């Protein structure tokens, strides 16, 4: 009595699907081992279940890396170049971004030192005038804030005192 044919389509019931996967995984691994022994073939199988479980088989006479290397040589497809090119591009962009941020940081630190009256030797007359103007404007803002704070404090004290 032979086995009946089944329709090849996704098994909807998750439990039945997992049982079938497990049985068929065992079967395909057995077939791979038989091919290795009977035919002296180099076989490598890598599988991931729908739940992410990893299974593999590789002939004892080789390893998976050698199989991939032979595949690349025979097919002319470089499996790794696109990944490394993308990573190299990403690293290069990140390095450029880092260098740009470092330059901004250096400029801001120099500006802070100049506002503190340090590191003025390399500045020409126009830069010194601009720095002086910026400091005058900042001083006006600080004085206005000080006056507003004093006024609100005096008002609060007056309110508390006369209430």
Image (spheres, rainbow, N blue to C red):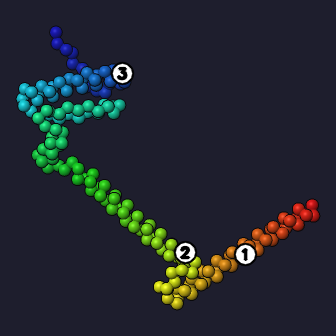
Q: Which residue lies furthest to the right in this view?
A: 162
Most foreground residue, 2 or 49: 49
Q: How crowded is mark 2: few (under 14 residues within 10 Å), some or many (20 or more)?
A: few
State which tag comes first along the sequence, 1 or 3. Answer: 3
Residue at 51% from the left image edge and 72% from the top image edge: 109
Q: How crowded is mark 1: few (under 14 residues within 10 Å), some or many (20 or more)?
A: few
Residue 161 screen position, x and y as percent: 91, 64
Real-space Cα separation, disc 3 to disc 2, in angstroms:
67 Å
Residue 37 screen position, x and y as percent: 9, 27
State which tag comes first along the sequence, 3 or 2. Answer: 3
Q: Find residue 112 and name its label.
A: 2
Q: Name the residue under label 1.
A: 144
Residue at 16% from the left image edge and 38% from the top image edge: 63
Q: Is 7 located above or below residue 98 in the figure? A: above
Q: Name the residue under label 3.
A: 15
Please tell me in which quadrant of the rendered image residue 34 appears: top left
Residue 75 visible, this angle? no
- Find numbered disc 2 in the image and state the secondary structure of the residue it sits on: helix
In-image side of 33 versus 135 (left or right): left
Real-space Cα separation, disc 1 to disc 3, in angstroms:
75 Å
Residue at 47% from the left image edge and 85% from the top image edge: 122
Residue at 60% from the left image edge and 84% from the top image edge: 133
Q: Is 137 located above or below residue 13 in the figure? A: below
- Find numbered disc 1 in the image and state the secondary structure of the residue it sits on: helix
Real-space Cα separation, disc 2 to disc 1, in angstroms:
22 Å
């Amino acid at each position: 009595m032979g086995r009946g044919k089944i329709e090849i389509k996704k098994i909807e019931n998750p439990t039945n699907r997992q049982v079938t996967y497990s049985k068929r995984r065992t079967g395909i691994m057995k077939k791979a081992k038989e091919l290795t022994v009977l035919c002296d073939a180099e076989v490598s199988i890598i599988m991931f279940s729908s739940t992410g479980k990893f299974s593999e088989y590789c002939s004892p006479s080789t390893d998976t890396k050698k199989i991939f290397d032979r595949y690349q040589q025979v097919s002319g497809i470089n499996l790794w170049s696109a990944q490394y090119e993308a990573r190299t591009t990403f690293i290069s962009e990140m390095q450029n971004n880092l260098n740009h941020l470092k330059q901004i940081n250096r400029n801001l630190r120099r500006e802070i030192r100049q506002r503190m009256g340090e590191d003025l030797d390399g500045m020409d007359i126009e830069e010194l005038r601009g720095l002086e103007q910026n400091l005058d404007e900042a001083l006006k803002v600080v004085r206005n804030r000080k006056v507003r704070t004093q006024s609100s404090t005096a008002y609060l004290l007056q309110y508390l005192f006369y209430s």
